[in-house]
Image (tube, rainbow, N blue to C red):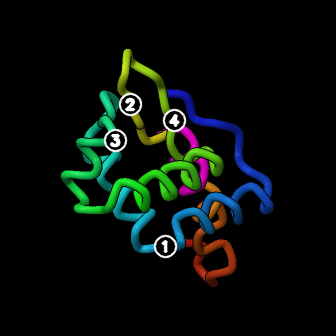
Amino acid sequence: MVILDEPHIEEAAQGFAAMGSEARLQVLQTLVKAGHGGLTVGDIQSRTGMAASTLAHHLRFLASAGLIEQEKDGRSVISRAAYGRLEALAGFILKECCIDAATGEC
């Protein structure tokens, strides 16, 4: 797994904004649960219950923010969580955890 460089605040804001919808967060969680093998659009649709057009919109949004990766596999498109990007975002928000606390510990 490749962890990307720490994002700048603008990149982090874009990533967090992409997760700022219940539907997109549901799709992202579904892909994280699926692991590195990813899922087809049909599989995501059956697990989330989203309409195809709604799901396509959310997948495009997540892909443009770099939170998921998509790959054509024959007639199917496989979507996967971009684990490196997600780890970089988590690291960004937690990097200075408790730095201003009197003890320096959380």
Q: Earlier in the sequence, mark 1 or mark 2?
A: 1
Q: Earlier in the sequence, mark 3 or mark 2?
A: 3
Q: Which mark is residue 45?
A: none
Residue named by callout 4? 69
- Name which residue lies at 29% across and 52% down: 30
CB contact under 8 Å: marks 3 and 2 = no
Residue 72: image location, x then y, percent: 45, 22
Q: Nearer the viewer, residue 72 or 94?
A: 72
Helix, strand or loop at mark 3:
helix
Q: Give the residue type that dot 3 points to.
A: Val
Q: Nearer the viewer, residue 92 or 98?
A: 92
Say left or right for 93 vs 69. Answer: right
Residue named by callout 2? 78
Q: Which mark is residue 41?
A: 3
What's the magenta region? 83-90
Residue 83: image location, x then y, percent: 47, 40
Q: Nearer the viewer, residue 5 or 68?
A: 68
- Name which residue lies at 58% across and 63% down: 18
